Amino acid sequence: MSRDFGEVEHLQVSRKGPADFVSQADRRADDTLREELMRARPDFGITLEESGDTNVREDGPRWIVDPIDGTSNFLHGIPHFAISIAAEQFGEITACIVYEPLQDQLFWAVKGRGAYLNDRRLRVSARKNIADCLFATGIPFKGHGDFGRFTHILNEVMPQCAGIRRFGAASLDLAYVAAGRFDGFWEEGLQPWDIAAGMFLVREAGGIITDIRGSDQMLKTGGIVAANPAMHTQLHKLIAKGIKAQRDSG
């Protein structure tokens, strides 16, 4: 993958849909991860972004994998992307990794044993004043998401906090929340492979995660609000206020 990134201008790229790309590197990573994970745990099913489900059974164990989270960054030569892998058993995530290859940063967690960056234990930030907080999000783009809804939410959150960042790789945004680099993250319209590993990192690092409606159905609804314990309720209320403002304006 690092080799491909260094030769990004030579990659052959085909469109999957509006503003959504797939590269040879994506396919190679998909094939390699499928082969290695199925060899390691032949009883596990696997859900991959590029190639879909293999041997996935209801309530059976499975891997949830994004071979390159941040494909558009990768293809534009922006060094911010990751491999995201989560293990799910009986409907619950039990272990994960998010690997940032160019920085050699391995974020990982095992249920009940905490979250780590390489060999260092991670904890979410301890900030309690929203004016000091830095949040991350994902911005709707061509063919994806509700820009009007996002704008109303942004109008509520932005004036209250120290800043908002959009880096284009949800798994890393969530890993950075787990590491205390961001104080919170929200986004809608995500797929399980975008968030399964990252949300587990945040939880094991002491953070709070819900979907946009406040439930724990993130993998089903595709919406997520993740933050340190002091900030989650405040961030969630601002998001809800923005959604209400959009409804009232319509």
Image (spheres, rainbow, N blue to C red):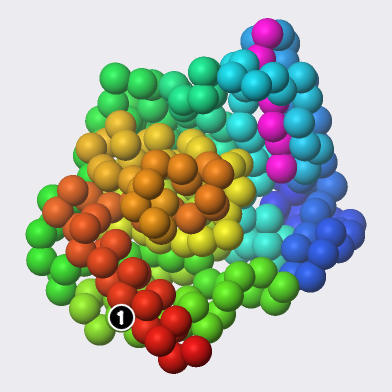
- The amino acid type, in three-letter code, at marker 1 is Glu
Residue shown at 30% from the left, 57% from the top = 184
- Find out whether residue 193 is within the magenta segment: no
Quarter holding residue 152: bottom left
From the viewer's perspective, is 22 left or right of 5? right
From the viewer's perspective, is 154 left or right of 88? left
Q: Determine which residue is flagged by label 1.
A: 156
Does residue 122 lie above or below 17 as drawn?
Answer: above
Image quadrant for the N terminus? top right
Q: Residues within 10 Å of mark 1 (few under 14, many from 20)?
A: some
From the viewer's perspective, is 94 left or right of 131? right
Quarter holding residue 238: bottom left
> Picture coordinates of residue 34 (x, y %)?
75, 25
Residue range in magenta is 43-49
Instruction: Tally the marks.
Output: 1
Q: From where the camera sits, is residue 182 visible?
A: no
Q: Secondary structure at mark 1?
A: helix
Does residue 144 lie above or below 35 as drawn?
Answer: below
> Picture coordinates of residue 147 (x, y %)?
56, 80
> Picture coordinates of residue 68 (x, y %)?
66, 46
Q: From where the camera sits, is residue 87 visible?
A: yes
